[in-house]
Image: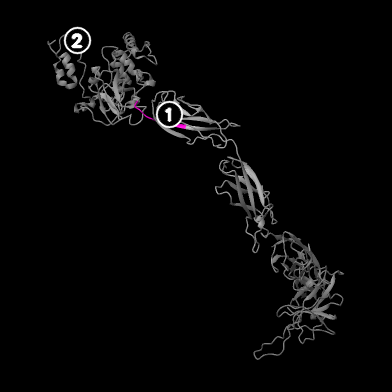
Amino acid sequence: MALLVPSCHTWILVKHPLALCLNTMGEHHFSVCRVSKTTYCNANQSFPKPKQQVEVWDSPPRVIKFLRKHQRGSSANGLRRQKRDWVIPPINVPENSRGPFPHMLVRIRSDQDKDVGIRYSITGAGADQPPSGIYNIDPISGNMFVTQPLDREERASFHLRAHAVDMNGNQVENPIDLYIYVIDMNDNRPEFQNQVYNGSVAEGSKPGSSVMQVTATDSDDSTTANGMVRYRILSQSPHSPIPNMFTINSETGDIVTVAAGLDREKVSQYTIIVQATDMEGNLNFGLSNTATALISITDINDNPPELTVRTFSGEVPENKVNVVVTNLTVVDRDQPHSPNWNAVYRIVSGDPSGHFTIRTNPITNEGMVTVVKPVDFEMNRAFMLTVVVSNQAHLASGIQSSLQSTAGVTISVQDVNEPPVFPVNPKMIRFEEGVPAGTTLTVFAAQDPDHFIHQTVRYSKLSDPANWLKINRTNGQITTMALLDRESIYVKNNVYEATFLAFDNGSPQASGTGTLQIYLIDVNDNAPVLIPREAQVCERARPNSRINITASDADADPNIGPFVFELPSFPASVRRNWTISRLSGDYAQLRLRIPYLEASVYEIPIIVSDSGNPPLSNRSVIRVKVCPCDDNGDCSATGAVAAAGLGTGLLFFRREKERQAKPLLIDPEDDVRDNILKYDEEGGGEEDQDYDLSQLQQPESLDHIINKPTGVRRVDERPVIAESQYPVRPSLPHPGDIGDFINDGLRAADNDPTAPPYDSLLVFDYEGSGSTAGSVSSLNSTSSGDQDYDYLNDWGPRFKKLADLYGGGDDD
């Protein structure tokens, strides 16, 4: 909605000499137009930018009328052409006005107010919307007011709409747009982002080198002089070498060097006071503010290090290391504890063997001349070193080294009493073991390094673990005091080691130690020993019932294996019952030669010989327990007791007791069952494999025993009475007590009514239904009279011996 001024003469402005016009066709340009009579603003007008703005409070307010559309003529098609609209100029209100308030801005008027009663209102932000209440209007007169001071930095413009209605609320005019602009006043100083700025520039920088930038902002309108800031340097401290070492770009705030001569060693920091002024830097009308710029001058390596004197001196005792001989002092004017200041020392001549080095003290920057390799007074009594000092960082371009960066160092070596030294340490000699006492082994002599002093060297024994040796006190001759035994616990890897002390008669006395190593050559002086010493086998020869044997020999190769294992010819029963077969060079097998050997403990002598030259032999005894075995080839304790001649009553008792625990007849600690090694050998002949396993069937059920009716008693049933007390076998029985133990058990069983047989029939096991075994009830062990035992010859070779005993007829 705009104000229409049809012929640029019907719109009446306030009677004020100043009017502010707006060009809405493009960029807004505000201009103060001085006129002497009524002025019209056309939408196509443009004015130059004002040099400054003024308030328009003193003149009566202008009148703004509602715009009406006028028509001019008719076209052929009956349409009317509308006249050009005129733009309502904005309402300009200066900020920070002191009033009085409310202050009238303009008067809104409708041309129809002569015909009907009109009521006026305004809407928009600042009127009936937040921030509400800044503007209001008299509904009857149409006078529009501002009610308080305005701040352009809070809100720079307002857009309101004016309305006109009749007394019934009906709109009589189209609403018009009112634009209110808050005119900026220079009421804000420039503000620096920081009060203190820090920058740096290297010393020796050329003019024009960038240093830093400072920035200030102004809250006023930046499109006017009120917000245009300019910079300048107010002061520089210190004024060395000149008062104006730096300059600043007035518009950007960039600080650069303007002169040469920056030297950190003279001035390490400058303090610059910078001023920012608005109104384009006009000091008469603009507002100003200041900030501080601290400019640090950074170091470059433009000062070479210089040694304080041309010659240094020191002394050091011989044979000492990590000793500081002397300190080299240096001066460097660059930044302390920086690469430009840190000193690096080098020895360029006078120490070809590398006895010395120079370390830098990190605190004082001094060079510490240090001994890293012992010096010998007898070889060098003095050293003349040439040293050079430099920095960690290279010198800056164009800077030359100083003549004072080089110096000489004189070092004197002090003679000290040095201990005697064994030329060969440790010293190794070789001897056969067993050399007799009094044998001279070697001369273990030491030398005194102090050639310029005549001193006497004496010797003593320091360490001799086996006490085999002695040393001559004056000449160092080593002699044995006992036999040297390679198998001694003091010999490690065939080497016996002893240490000796050599000392001089200097003041103070000095001593050195030497180690003598004797490599003992083995001789065959130890016979082999049989392993194991105890074992067990089954009384009947089985493929897996064999004993692996070997031997141990304390000697070394070639005086050890392969070993030879033999059975002695006496007693003859040894070779008749046993045999040895060779497995390898160090192992053999001992096994039964006969099919059956009565259960007992046998001591079998075996002769073992080594491979020495000449060989050594040893007659060793192995204790072999021969016992009945179960199906797994393990020694059966029950079978062992039965084989020893126990009665049937004690056998049944022992059977029940040993089902849970089967103690051996020897000490558990001497149990040698682990020494029985089983191999997958067939052994024996085909007759050994002719077993009828059907005779060992177990009963399918015990119900016929458990469910027996009460009162029915079998003759082999155990009476329900108190048990008799049987003798208890000692936990560690002696083998000679076994016979007494068996006899005591037999007597107790014969007198025990609870022991089987309870009658004439004894059931040892139930063979199960369908057994192929025949009945043994026909056998009567108590029958008397002659009986024909010839049928035993038909039972095979295992019963041949029995047939010979009982079937011999009248030959006896």
Task: Give the SS element for disc 1.
Answer: strand
Which residues are the magenta region?
A: 516-524
Image quadrant assignment for residue 617:
top left
Q: Is residue 464 above or below residue 349?
A: above
- Reading the image, the residue beneath label 1 is 441
Q: Mark 1 belongs to which amino acid?
A: Leu
Give residue 667's position: percent from left, percent from top: 38, 18
The numbered dot on residue 755 is: none
**Residue 546 in sight:** no
Give residue 11's position: percent from left, percent from top: 80, 83
Q: Mark 2 belongs to which amino acid?
A: Ser
Queried whether the magenta region covers residue 27, the answer comes back as no
Q: Is residue 801 above or below residue 201?
A: above
Does residue 427 appear to the left or right of 662 in the view shown? right
- Mark 2 is surrounded, within 10 Å at the Cα level, by few (under 14), some (14 to 19) or many (20 or more) other residues, namely few
Does residue 513 appear to the left or right of 405 in the view shown? left
Does residue 470 appear to the left or right of 409 in the view shown? left
